[in-house]
Image (cartoon, helix red, strand yellow):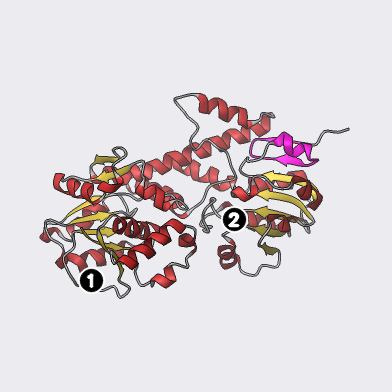
Amino acid sequence: MRVMIHGSELSAATAAAALSWVGHQVCWQPLGNTWQELRGRGWLVREPLLTQHIEDALANGRLRIDEQQSLSGSPIDVLWLALSPDQREEATRVVEGSAERLSPQSILINNATFPVGDTERLESLVADRGTVAVALPDTLEEGRAWETFTRARQWLLGCDDDRAERQVRELMRAFNRRHEVFQRMPRRAAELTKLAINGMLATRISYMNEMAGLADTLGVDVEHVRQGMGADPRIGYEYLYPGCGFGGPNFSRDLMGLADVQSSSGRHSELLDQVLEINEHKKETLFRKLWAHFHGRLEGRRVAIWGAAFKPGTARIDQAPVLTLLRALFAQGVHVRLHDPAALPAVREAIGDHPLLTLCEGDPLVACEDVDALMLVTEWKAYWNPDWEALSMRLSGRLVLDGRNIYDPQFVAAQGLHYRGIGRRADPREH
């Protein structure tokens, strides 16, 4: 099929690479960005499989990147919109500009997270061409974009037309051989389901964080609670890990989008308000534990932070807990030595040259030189098994604050360190 893809998001790059890989003729218009500019972006650098497939598709001619934004040319079988939520006006311009190349045999695929009902609105722009629009919400996982597109567990297909469903299935047939991944429903239902899924996942995380806070108060190890809850088949283990808050561009935007849908419908959601409030409160939990351990005497202290990205495998810090944590630490005059395998450029761009911040590259232990405490914020694999003897020698304050509960409290305490996790704690034994 002849596929036109619009967008500079990860979802656009992934669709362009994957669809051209299986033989479709794809033109990707990345909205004013050249390929040389895009390939250096942090979100693409962290996707080596994806980058290689794009290079291969460009070399064999199945993929063309149109950097001039020309909207004239041959007929289009599939117009694929993979834009960010704030690009609704751009979506309108693209659809109207592409109208002459569309026909009753064409389909418009809305892969963006726009407000509920926008797929119908986009279809109305080309109603005179007889083109049908379908919703196919983006479900990619950053850091695993290629795998989650080509081996998707589920595609929500918002479609009210049987012919359009057949065309989408043919377009994606190469990725639908292992098992049935399409779940068809009305367009508005698919758009709302995408938001509802992330709302439920965020609610599980926030509830588990509430239980971790209660466990702290009662002197209970929350790991026992988590395992007991997860063993119940009605609950399961997914997204049941307490931590120091979630972030990320898509997750946070979807939650806000769901809140906006609730508000605009006249059904204000106190539950969503609580989920968002709990999450923002949790982003300061490591700071509060530091404050409690040193009895509020923080000015002039030095701490190391491991991890800035909102999750492992990405260089992005959008709504990441580290931003809230840094603001709280700086306000108390705490010097921070920050290490992250990928996100330091994003931190530098967001924070600038702050007198209380030192960015550390290379060995994570470099960030721990003569600090009072270590704060683990992002659970990169490089942090899971540090040289504990070397780390103990560097931590003058003997304190480890584990924001992701990746360490064994008793093991850390056996190294002569004080351990504080999320709903977990241990101290060295007195001899």
Secondary-structure class at tag 1: loop
Q: Is residue 250 left or right of residue 103?
A: right
Q: Amino acid at mark 1?
A: Leu
Q: Quadrant of residue 408?
A: top right
Q: Residue at x 50, y 63 (%)?
A: 42
The answer to which of 424 and 339 lies nearer the viewer is 339
Which numbered disc, 1 or 2, marks the residue that appears first in the sequence? 1
- Left or right of residue 197: residue 290: right
- Is residue 391 rendered magenta in the image? no
Residue, disc 2 = 308
Residue 71 is labelled as 1
Residue 195 position within the rendered picture, expressed as x and y whole percent measured from the top left: 37, 45
**Which of the two residues, 6 or 178, is positioned nearer the viewer here?**
178
Identified at 74% across, 39% down, the residue is: 412
Task: Give, as a three-letter code, the residue at label 2.
Answer: Ala
Viewer-nearest residue: 95 or 17 = 17
Q: Which mark is residue 127?
A: none
Hey, which residue is sitting farthest bottom in the picture? 68
Q: Residue at x 31, y 57 (%)?
A: 21
Q: Residues within 10 Å of mark 2 (few under 14, many from 20)?
A: many
| Residue 114 left/right relative to 198 | left
Q: Position of residue 105 (x, y in %)?
A: 13, 56
Residue 374 higher or lower than 94, as above or below: above
Specify start and end residues of the magenta stretch as a single range. 409-426
Could you give the CA–CA distance between mark 1 and mark 2, rounded to whole angstroms? 40 Å
| x, y percent for residue 222 | 62, 31
- Image: 127 above or below 405: below
